[in-house]
Amino acid sequence: MAIKSTADKVATIQKGYTLDGPTIELGAAIVDGELHKDAPVRLPLAMMNRHGLVAGATGTGKTVTLHMMAEQLSTAGVPVFLADIKGDLSGLATAATGSEKLLARTEGIGQAWSGKTFPVEFLALGGDGKGIPVRATITSFGPILLSRVMDLNETQESSLQLVFHFADKNNLELIDLKDLRAVIQYLTSAEGKDALEELGGLSKATAGVILRELITLEAQGMEKFFGEPEFDTAELLRTAPDGRGVVSCLELPTLQTKPMLFSTFLMWLLADLFEDLPEAGDLDKPKLVFFLDEAHLLFNGASKAFLDAITTTVRLIRSKGVGIFFVTQTPKDVPADVLGQLANRVQHALRAYTPEDAKALKATVSTFPTSDYDLEETLTTAGIGEAVITVLNENGAPTPVALTRLRAPESVMGPSTDTLISSTVAASALLPKYGTAVDNISAYEKITGKGAAPTGPAAGPARHEGGPAQQDGGPAQQRGGLDPNAIDAEARRIEEEILGRPSSRTAPAPGAPPDFGEAPERRAPRPAQPRSGGIGGDLAGALGGGLQSMARSLGTQLGRELLRGVFGTSSKRRRR
């Protein structure tokens, strides 16, 4: 094979990155050791929902790369989510000041640089930081993700799913950790013995292990990450009044002490988006680009169910207009099934100091298309702020591999001042909505009898700790709702006596667990239904109550089966 000249190599890159639609400008190509600003390297905006990987050794510039990409996405009107591991990304809210060295670099790659600010929303998990608190309810988080946080094995994970099933079936709202603890304590008590046996696959010993892990989470102070008001992931899709995409910057100041919690929480955000967003097909630009930093934390020691759920989410969320960029050190950190979905690659330098490093280097090279570069040499000699790039062009074909000197961000490459962050948070429209935690009546109060139920439409949802539950009617009313066993009995009667067919609904077992009813704050008075005249009206009057009961019962059962997503998540919006 003939050796190509430098001019031919440059021409190949120029042709491969000549694109018609809007793009993210990544930088200029380096060929045979020379920088060519007439050979720009870019990524089509329409292809960013094909996902991507930003990889490289520590200190090679991965964070600056995603910073630079986030700026251009925002300018193009695309909302961005960033996990701010080191606190550097808050600088997006502060315009950078050009230095002689910086301007020489930007001039060399053909970048018309000027300092700019970008619309940033500062977030913090559970208020653990300066941003708007981001919380999830336990029921929304789901059993698979929670098992990941609790480091449960696959048997224990399956058992936790049974606990969630029991809570769903019995109207026990799992809002925070003490709700889940109360349910497990009930199941392992003498009163809940029959209910535990009915769950079949859940042994008392396994329930005890889960309970101990749960208490450990509480002891580590993780209860503040779970609760209400639950963060609505639709907030991540906002644009600023000037049309630029809002950059949601999630601060993770204590990542090193809770890495599993933080990485799993990020997956919850994605899973919730996945379940809520409609199908969108191919768009001119994505609805959201999600940068998932320290991605290896997601996969270390993950169960098969967890990995399957991630793979499904990554594969299918593309058609909903969301692009995911995993940020980590080497492609080996990402499972093959997920890596195969990441079409856009930005690979910073790798080091080969150990045999394991050399192995990772060879594996990384094998993931790139054939190119005019000696990639083993190129990847070990690339400088800070340089990366080997290949992306999908507008036709969905890989672009030529190009060693690229990357563009410089136009906002500060470092943290914004505390004063600016505090003032931005104080002025945020999200603060009144999420700033103050609330503690509504849920499983803990229902099981322990603490907290009085509201007695009328004007009653608020606030919890009342201490004091017995009000008793203002029959047993079902005392527990806050209609007895599902009574509803099922009425459904059986309607099917057998009126509809004239055998009922498929089984009678409750003797000693069935008590019904805990609906949460009072989720109930609303039912308006009276007018009866129309004639035979149809009389029949509706005769059958309406029973059929409505049957429909409510069937709908409740089917709804609970369908509303839990690939991670077992169940957003409050989908439960309404």
Image (spheres, rainbow, N blue to C red):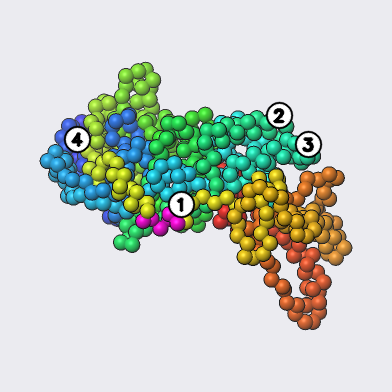
Residue type, label 3 = Ala
Q: Residue furthest front?
A: 467
Q: Secondary structure at mark 2?
A: helix
* CB atoms of marks 1 and 3 within 8 Å: no
Residues drawn in magenta: 427-432
Classify the position of the N terminus by image quarter: top left
How dense is the environment of label 1, judged by Cα within 10 Å: few (below 14), some, or many (20 and up)? Answer: some
Estimate the spatial distance between the alpha carbons at disc 3 and disc 4, rounded to whole Å: 74 Å
Sequence order check, earlier mark of 4 and 1: 4
Q: Residue furthest bottom?
A: 533
Numbered marks: total: 4
Above or below 222: residue 284: below
How dense is the environment of label 2, judged by Cα within 10 Å: few (below 14), some, or many (20 and up)? Answer: few
Looking at the image, is mark 4 or mark 1 nearer the viewer? 1
Q: Nearer the viewer, residue 171 or 270?
A: 171
Classify the position of the C terminus by image quarter: bottom right
- The residue wearing badge 4 is 31
Looking at the image, is mark 1 or mark 2 nearer the viewer? 1
- The residue wearing badge 1 is 435
